[in-house]
Amino acid sequence: MQSNEFERGHEKTTGRRAGQSSPFRGLWATGLAVALAAFFASTLPQVFFVAVFGELLFFGALGTLIVAAIRRDPLWPNRITAWDQAALLALLSSVTGLFVDVESVAAALQEQAAAN
C-alpha cells in the first residue's frame, strides 16, 4: 500500500504531482535564449550587435517552433510552452529590428569587404 505522499506521486515541498514542472520554467528557458543571443552577438563589432542579436532571436524562435511541433505541445495549457517561448522570441526579434541602423551596418560591411 502507498502510505506517504511521495509514493502516491506528490512532492512534499511543492505539493505538485511528480513529473510536473514549474509553470514558469519556459520563462527561464526564454531568458537563457536571450542571454545566449546577447553573448554571441557581443562577440562581433558593436555596429553589428543589434542586427545579429535580432537575427539570433529570430532563429531561436524558429528552432523553438520546430521543437514545439515535434513534441506536439498543447497550445492552451496552464503553463508556458514552447509555443509561447517562440512567440516571445519572435516578438523580441521584431522589436530589436526597429533599432537596427541599416546605413551604418551596410557601411561597415562595405568597409570590411574593401579591406579584404
Image: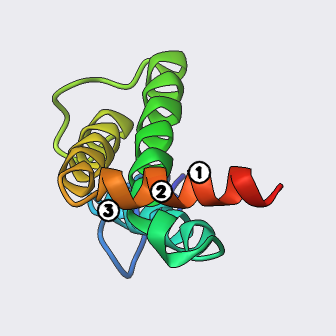
Tell which of 31 and 22 is nearer to you. 31
Of labels 1 and 3, earlier in sequence is: 3
Disc marking residue 43: none
Graded by Cα atoms within 10 Å as few (under 14), some (14 to 19) or many (20 or more), the crowding at tag 2 reads few
Q: Is residue 84 left or right of residue 113?
A: left
Residue found at the very far right of the displayed protein: 116
Q: Quadrant of residue 11?
A: bottom left
Instruction: Give the spatial CA distance, label 2 vs label 1.
Output: 5 Å
Q: Position of residue 8 (x, y in %)?
A: 45, 54
Q: Is any atom of residue 55 visible in this view? A: yes
Q: Nearer the viewer, mark 2 or mark 3?
A: 2
Q: Is residue 80 left or right of residue 4?
A: left
Do tag 2 and tag 1 residues touch (Cβ < 8 Å)? yes
The amino acid beneath tag 1 is Gln
Q: Position of residue 55 (x, y in %)?
A: 45, 45
Task: Return the residue at label 2.
Answer: 107
Q: Position of residue 116 (x, y in %)?
A: 83, 55
Of labels 2 and 3, earlier in sequence is: 3
The amino acid beneath tag 3 is Leu
Instruction: Give the spatial CA distance, label 1 vs label 3.
Output: 39 Å
* Residue located at (32% from left, 75% from top): 14
The amino acid beneath tag 2 is Ala
Disc marking residue 110: 1
Instruction: Give the spatial CA distance, label 2 vs label 3.
Output: 37 Å
Q: Is any atom of residue 32 visible in this view? A: no
Q: Position of residue 35 (x, y in %)?
A: 48, 72
Disc marking residue 27: 3
